[in-house]
Image (cartoon, helix red, strand yellow):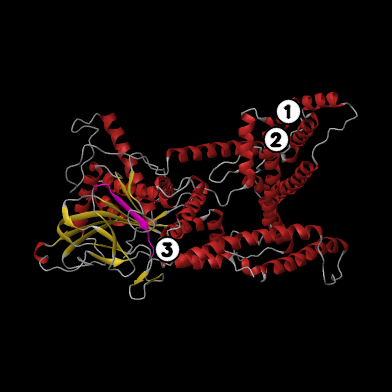
C-alpha cells in the first residue's frame, strides 16, 4: 500500500521542526518515494487503459452518439479506477494532494528540509546530494547557494556527492550530445542525441498522462455551476492545454526560466547534420524528412531531402519517423479543438510551439499570437537577466550571517540596506512618533514599565503628513524602506513566490533612567510571530489570536547609540539562547515567522533604540491596504510639489528659491541629500484611513 505522499511530507516537516531529524529524514524520503510511485502508477495505468478499457457493467439505453462517446469514457474511467486501485492499494481519491503540496514537490522543496536533516545527522554525503538536488531546480535561492559553497569547502565532501537525485535523463543526454556535436564528434553526438530524443518523447508522454487529473477550477465556490456539456468542455480544455504545455516542461532545464525553443525539431536538425557528417545518408534523410513534418516549407531542408533522394536512388522512400508523425498529428488535432474554443467559447491559449501552421490560428488571433510570442521571449530574457545579477536585487547589500552561523533555520542578517543619511531621516521621523504617542493599545509601555515605547504606523504617518506635522518625503522613505526589505526577504527566502507587506511599524524603545536599577525583565519577551508559544509543551499553536497569516518577519535597525536592546533567538523552551544580533544602522535581520524562530529583545538599559518592525505574508488578502493608500497619498503629494515647482518657475518667485521644499510645520531641519523613487501613477481618491492595531 502506497501511503499518500502529502501526509508523509506533512509528518516529515513536523518532525523536522521538532528537531527529530532522523524521523524527518525517514518520512521525507518516503514521501519522495511515494510521489514517484504515484506518478509512475498514473502514467502506466493511463497508458494501459488507452490500449484496453474493459467495462464490467451494461450501458444504459441512449442515443447512438451518446453511447459512442460516453461509452468509451465510462469504460476508460472504470479501467483507471481498477488499475490505480491495484497499484496504489487504496482508493485513488486518497492521493489527491493540495496545490501547495504539489507545488512544493515540483520545486523540490522536500530536499531543502532533507539537506539540513542529513547535515544534523552527520550524513554529509546525503546532505550534499539533497542540497545539490534542490539547488539545481532553484539556482536563484541565495541561502542554498551559500550552503553549496560551504559544502564545497568541507574536507569530507567528494565531487561525486554533488549529484542531482531528480536528474531528467533526456537533459543529460541532450547536453552531452550537443557538446559532441560542437566538438565535431558526430558519431558520439548521434548516439546521445538519439537517446535524448527517445527519453524526451517518453517524458512528454508521462507529462501528458498526468494532465488527466481532477478539475481545477479558478473559483471552486462559484454559485452558478456549469451544466453537463459546459463542465465536460471546460475540463477537457484544461487537459488539452496542459498537454500542449508539456513540451515546455520537458524543454526547460531544471533551474532555468525559459524553455529551449523548438526542442523536438532541434533534435532532428542536429541529428540530420550529424548523420550526414558520418556518411549515413539514409538516417540523415529520415531526420530531414521528420524535420519537414514540423516545417514543411523549409527551403534548405527541402533541398537536402531532394539531394538525398538522388544519392539514395529514386526508388528509395524517404519518409519521416512514425513517432514524429504521430506526435505532430496529435498535437495539431488538439490545437484545432483549442482554437475552436478560443474563437467560439471565449477561451484563452498561449501556443507553446513556433511551428503551428498559420491556417490553424483564427484570423483575428494571428497578429496577437505573434505579439504574445515576442512578449514572452522578452519577458524570459528580462527574467534571466535578473537571475544573472544575483538573488539580492540591490547593489551593496550583503549577507553577513546566515542560518548556519545563527544556529537555526530560515534566519539571515543583511547589512547596508539603508545609508547613514536614510537612517538619520527616519530617526527624525520617529520624533513625530514620540510626540504623537502612537504606542500599542494606547499604553506608553506595552512590554515593560522600564522603557518608554514610541511607535508610528503607516496610517499615523499619513495623518501627520496631511496635518503638516512631518514632511511627506520622510513618510515616503518609510514606505520605500519597507518595500526594499520586502524585496530582499522575498529574493532570499521565497524567490518566485510573491510576498506582501502585512504590517509596518516604526518603533523606538527608550530606557527610563530611574527605572533601571535591579531590572530583570526583557524589552520584549520571547515569542513567535505567527503562533502562540507553549514552552512547557514544546509547541507553538498556530491559531488566533496569533497572526497566523504572517510568513516572514524583519527588523531594520536605524541606530546603535544605546546599551542593550539586541535581538536574540532561543530554543522552544524560550530559555536556551541560540543566536544574537547586535543593532546598527542599515542592518536587516530576517526570519520565518513560525515556531522555528522564537525570539525576544534584551532590555534597553540606556539610550533610545529605533527600528522598523516588518511582517510579510504570502496571502494577498492579508496585505496591508493602508500601505497602498499611503502610496497613493504620497504620489498625490509628489504631483502637487511638482506643480508648485513649475508654478514657481513661471512666476519667478523672488521670496524663495524654487528648488527649496515648501515650509512644513514642526518638521525640523532637513538633510540636504534625498533619494527619490518614482511611484506608480494612481487615480481616484483614497478612502478614509483607519488605524489597525497589529499587536
The disc, 1 or 2, on the residue closer to the chain's N-terminal end is: 2
Q: CA distance from mark 2 to mark 3?
A: 54 Å
Segment tinted magenta in the rendering? 585-594
665 is within the stretch colored magenta: no
Secondary element at image label 2? helix
587 is within the stretch colored magenta: yes
Look at the image and tell me in which quarter the C terminus lies: bottom left
Q: Which numbered circle lies on residue 278?
A: 1
Q: Residues within 10 Å of mark 3 (few under 14, many from 20)?
A: many
Marks 2 and 3 close (CB-CB < 8 Å): no
The disc, 2 or 3, on the residue closer to the chain's N-terminal end is: 2
Q: CA distance from mark 1 to mark 2?
A: 9 Å
Q: Which numbered circle lies on residue 549?
A: 3
Q: Which residue appears farthest toward the bottom when viewing the image? A: 536
Q: Is residue 309 left or right of residue 270?
A: right
Measuring from the top left, give residue 374's x and y in whole percent: 59, 35
Task: Write the residue at 19% across / 33% down.
Answer: 656
Q: Residues within 10 Å of mark 2 (few under 14, many from 20)?
A: many
Task: Write the residue at 61% across / 42% down.
Answer: 172
Task: Write the residue at 62% across / 59% down.
Answer: 36
Amino acid at each position: 500500500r502506497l501511503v499518500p505522499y502529502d501526509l508523509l511530507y506533512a509528518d516529515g516537516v513536523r518532525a523536522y521542526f521538532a528537531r527529530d531529524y532522523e524521523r524527518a529524514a525517514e518520512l521525507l524520503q518516503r514521501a519522495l518515494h511515494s510521489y514517484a510511485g504515484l506518478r509512475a502508477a498514473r502514467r502506466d495505468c493511463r497508458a494501459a487503459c488507452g490500449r484496453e478499457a474493459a467495462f464490467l457493467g451494461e450501458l444504459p439505453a441512449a442515443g447512438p452518439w451518446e453511447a459512442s462517446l460516453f461509452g468509451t469514457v465510462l469504460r476508460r474511467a472504470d479501467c483507471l479506477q481498477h488499475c490505480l486501485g491495484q497499484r496504489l492499494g487504496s482508493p485513488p481519491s486518497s492521493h489527491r494532494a493540495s496545490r501547495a503540496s504539489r507545488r512544493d514537490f515540483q520545486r523540490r522543496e522536500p530536499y531543502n528540509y532533507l539537506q539540513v536533516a542529513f547535515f544534523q545527522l552527520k550524513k554529509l554525503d546525503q546532505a550534499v546530494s539533497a542540497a545539490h538536488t534542490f539547488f539545481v531546480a532553484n539556482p536563484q535561492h541565495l541561502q542554498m547557494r551559500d550552503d553549496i559553497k560551504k559544502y564545497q569547502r568541507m574536507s569530507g565532501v567528494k565531487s561525486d556527492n554533488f549529484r542531482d537525485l531528480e536528474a531528467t535523463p533526456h537533459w543529460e543526454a541532450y547536453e552531452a550530445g550537443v557538446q559532441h556535436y560542437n566538438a565535431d564528434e558526430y558519431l558520439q553526438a548521434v548516439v546521445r542525441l538519439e537517446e535524448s530524443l527517445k527519453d524526451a518523447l517518453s517524458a512528454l508522454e508521462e507529462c501528458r498522462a498526468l494532465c488527466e487529473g481532477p478539475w481545477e477550477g479558478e473559483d471552486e465556490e462559484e454559485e452558478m455551476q456549469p451544466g453537463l456539456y459546459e463542465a465536460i468542455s471546460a475540463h477537457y480544455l484544461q487537459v488539452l492545454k496542459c498537454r500542449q504545455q508539456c513540451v515546455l516542461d520537458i524543454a526547460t532545464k531544471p533551474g532555468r526560466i525559459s524553455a529551449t525553443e523548438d526542442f523536438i525539431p532541434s533534435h532532428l536538425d542536429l541529428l540530420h547534420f550529424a548523420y550526414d557528417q558520418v556518411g549515413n545518408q539514409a538516417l540523415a534523410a529520415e531526420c530531414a524528412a521528420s524535420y519537414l513534418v514540423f516545417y514543411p516549407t523549409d527551403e534548405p531542408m527541402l533541398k537536402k531531402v531532394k539531394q538525398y533522394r538522388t544519392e539514395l536512388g529514386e526508388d528509395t522512400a524517404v519518409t519521416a519517423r512514425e513517432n514524429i508523425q504521430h506526435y505532430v498529428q496529435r498535437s495539431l488535432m488538439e490545437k484545432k479543438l483549442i482554437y475552436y474554443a478560443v474563437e467560439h467559447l471565449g477561451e484563452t491559449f498561449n501556443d507553446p510551439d513556433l511551428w503551428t501552421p498559420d491556417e490553424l490560428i483564427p484570423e483575428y488571433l494571428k497578429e496577437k499570437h505573434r505579439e504574445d510570442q515576442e512578449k514572452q521571449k522578452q519577458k524570459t530574457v528580462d527574467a534571466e537577466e535578473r537571475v544573472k545579477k544575483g538573488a539580492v536585487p540591490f547593489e551593496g547589500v550583503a549577507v553577513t550571517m546566515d542560518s548556519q552561523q545563527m544556529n537555526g533555520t530560515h534566519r539571515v542578517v543583511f547589512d547596508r540596506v539603508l545609508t547613514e543619511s536614510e537612517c538619520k531621516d527616519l530617526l527624525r521621523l520617529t520624533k513625530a512618533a514620540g510626540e504623537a504617542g502612537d504606542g500599542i493599545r494606547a499604553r506608553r509601555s506595552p512590554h515593560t514599565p522600564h522603557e518608554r515605547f514610541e511607535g508610528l504606523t503607516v496610517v499615523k504617518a499619513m495623518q501627520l503628513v496631511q496635518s503638516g506635522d512631518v514632511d511627506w518625503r520622510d513618510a515616503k522613505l518609510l514606505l520605500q524602506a519597507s518595500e526594499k526589505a520586502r524585496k530582499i526577504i522575498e529574493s532570499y527566502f521565497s524567490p518566485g513566490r510573491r510576498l506582501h507587506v502585512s504590517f509596518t511599524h516604526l518603533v523606538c524603545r527608550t530606557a527610563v533612567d530611574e527605572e533601571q536599577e535591579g531590572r530583570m525583565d526583557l524589552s520584549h519577551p520571547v515569542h513567535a510571530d505567527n503562533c502562540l508559544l507553549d514552552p512547557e509543551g514544546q509547541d507553538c499553536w498556530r491559531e488566533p489570536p496569533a497572526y497566523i497569516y504572517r510568513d516572514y518577519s524583519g527588523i531594520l535597525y536605524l541606530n546603535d547609540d544605546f546599551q542593550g536592546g539586541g535581538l536574540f533567538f532561543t530554543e522552544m523552551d524560550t530559555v536556551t539562547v541560540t543566536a544574537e544580533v547586535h543593532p546598527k544602522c542599515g542592518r536587516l535581520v530576517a526570519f520565518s515567522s513560525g515556531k522555528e524562530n522564537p525570539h525576544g529583545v534584551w532590555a534597553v538599559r540606556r539610550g533610545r533604540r529605533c527600528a522598523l518592525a516588518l511582517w510579510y505574508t504570502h496571502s494577498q488578502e492579508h496585505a496591508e491596504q493602508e500601505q497602498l493608500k499611503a502610496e497613493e497619498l504620497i504620489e498625490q503629494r509628489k504631483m502637487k510639489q511638482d506643480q508648485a515647482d513649475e508654478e514657481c518657475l513661471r512666476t519667478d518667485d523672488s521670496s524663495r528659491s524654487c528648488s527649496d521644499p515648501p515650509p512644513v510645520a514642526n518638521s525640523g531641519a532637513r538633510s540636504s541629500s534625498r533619494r527619490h523613487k518614482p511611484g506608480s501613477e494612481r487615480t481616484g481618491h483614497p478612502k478614509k484611513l483607519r488605524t489597525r492595531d497589529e499587536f
